[in-house]
Amino acid sequence: MQLEQLRQLVLDTLVDMKAKDVSVMDVRGKTSVTDYMVVASGTSDRHVKAIAETIAFRSKEAGEAPLGTEGVAEGEWALVDLNGVVVHVMQAKVRDFYNLERLWSAPAEVPKLAATAH
């Protein structure tokens, strides 16, 4: 499955599962971990769990088994790692606290500091 197809499968699943406030970030050039980060909110721990489990199931059905999942049992913040697409599903309070969209929208390069003479 191509990267864009996988991203679309994730987005379609989020719509089907009625996830809230879906955000897709192209992080190529900012990290080597993945190409896209998708962040979405669930309305409860059960909703977060159901969304993450369904994404993992549908991607596996499509031939792209997740490299791993984290936090699904707790349901506050679940992560599904699909290699080229990493999906974060969170309850609103957790999402507000960590604010991943702001974190990943920061500039990719850190300016070099001038050396100081001693």
Image: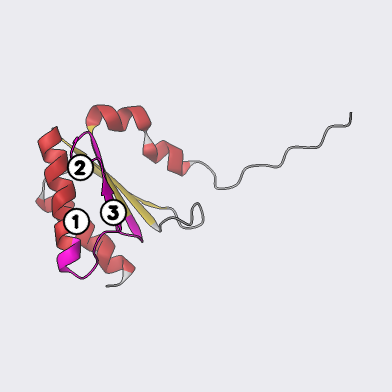
Does the CB distance between marks 3 and 1 fall below 8 Å? no
- Answer left or right for 76 relative to 85: left
Query: Disc 1 residue type?
Result: Ala
The stretch drawn in magenta includes residue 75: yes
Q: Residue at x 29, y 33 (%)?
A: 95
**First-in-chain label (3 vs 1):** 1
Q: Residue at x 15, y 50 (%)?
A: 53
Q: Residue at x 30, y 58 (%)?
A: 67
Q: Which mark is residue 68?
A: 3
The magenta region covers 59-85
Query: Disc 2 residue type?
Result: Val
Task: State which quadrant residue 50 falls in.
Answer: top left
| Coordinates of residue 114 in the picture (x, y in percent) | 78, 37
* C-alpha separation, residue under disc 3 versus residue under disc 1: 9 Å
User: Which of label 3 and label 1 is nearer to you?
Assistant: 3
Q: Which mark is residue 118?
A: none
Q: Which mark is residue 56?
A: 1
- Answer left or right for 87 relative to 54: right
The residue closer to the viewer here, 76 or 96, is: 76
Task: Name the residue beneath numbered marker 2.
Answer: 72
Q: Quadrant of the C terminus?
A: top right
Tell me if I can see residue 38 in this picture: yes
In the rendered image, the vertical position of residue 62 relative to residue 88, given as above or below: below
Query: Disc 3 residue type?
Result: Gly
